[in-house]
Image (spheres, rainbow, N blue to C red):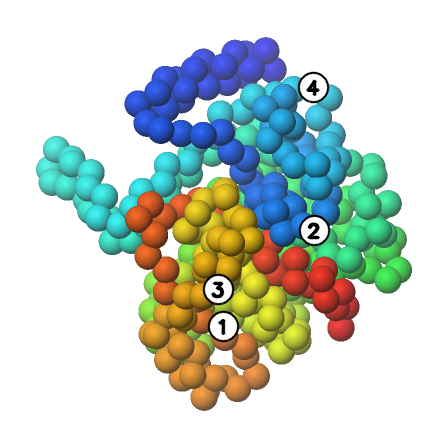
Amino acid sequence: MPDLHRHIGRVVLGIVNSYLDHFSSAPTLGGTGVRAALALAQAGIPNTVHLVSDNRVFRELLPPQVQIITTATKDTWEPHLIIQYPAGAKVDLEDGSIRSKSPNRIILVNDRPNELLEPSPQLPELFRKANVVLVSGFNAMLDPTLTLNRTRQVTEALSECNPRPIVFLEDAGYHLHSVLEAFHSGFKDVADIHSMNEDELQNYIDREIDLLDPHSVRQAIEDVMPHVLAPTLVLHTRHFALAHGQRAQILRPSLAAGNDLAGARYMFGDSITESALTNVQAAPHQSEAVEFARAFNAIEPDAVVVPARALEPRTPTTIGLGDTFVAGVLGDLVTRNTHT
């Protein structure tokens, strides 16, 4: 079966590469932890990323500031396709057409090693040296029993730390509700910060919200709190970043750093240079987001809301914005070395 899986992987990879021949493209790295590691490295912050699979191209693309810890025993190739599209993109169908309202992406998942997510025995040692630990990637798992086992391996490694690093949990779109439940069971009351985007928030509360309506957002936060696994909730959206709970006030500069770094990726893709970041920071904040922040704080004075920048790139990057936001938050926390 593993040989068959590898053969199918090579066939699909060939199909994907043939598809890419019709477009301009460049190899890049993905996954929340990996993209966050890349963005931190670009900001001059060394870090360590835990992998369960890698290959020659992956190692060539990873900068030297990123240390690899991996449980992979050989190179693997897992075709994983993400298609991004701009606002106004049109898809013709037999019975009509669909036109996109805003830039976004479609993710076609194929990640067998991440379905197993085998943790390294080096985790306790790594955690003891860390200021901040990002937890992500469990959403690709398919077996709830194995998921619970893996979460316990990670939480047991964290329990050996004194003092313990800040644990930042980035939510994700889970393929199976049973896996989500297993992860929540294993990670409840372990994280310090639980971060999610608007899609993940809406999945929890099972309804759409108006992101610029302060009362709609306030009710959504109230409704999602039973699902939040940490004393602080971070919500990052295309209009603003918001912190609610125990660490909200100290996270204000972190949210701003996350917004601006994600904005730089939105504008310039993988090329997040110092000048790119400066360019973004010179842009004004979205006027409607500024008004939202003012109105939201009038009804929730203890929350922190940081408006996003008003950016209009000709070719926006819509892949990895949340991952890069996380990198900005983590980078600020590490730089300020705050454990309060």
- Of tags 1 and 3, which is closer to the observer? 3
- Which of discs 1 and 2 lies nearer the camera? The answer is 2
Q: Which of marks 3 and 2 is in front?
A: 3
Q: Mark 4 points at which residue?
A: 74
Residue type of the residue flagged with mark 4: Lys
Q: Quadrant of residue 205?
A: bottom left
- Residue in view at x 49 percent, y 72 percent: 306
Residue designated by label 1: 306
| Disc 4 to disc 2, C-alpha distance | 28 Å
- Which amino acid does the dot numbered 1 rest on? Val
- How crowded pointer 3 is (Cα within 10 Å; few <14, some 14-19, many 20+) is rated as some
Residue contact between numbered discs 1 and 4, judged by CB atoms under 8 Å = no
Label 1 – label 4 distance at C-alpha: 44 Å
Q: Which quadrant would residue 231 be assigned to in this image? A: bottom right
Which element carries disc 2, helix, strand or loop? loop
Sequence-earlier tag: 3 or 4: 4
* Quadrant including the N terminus: top right
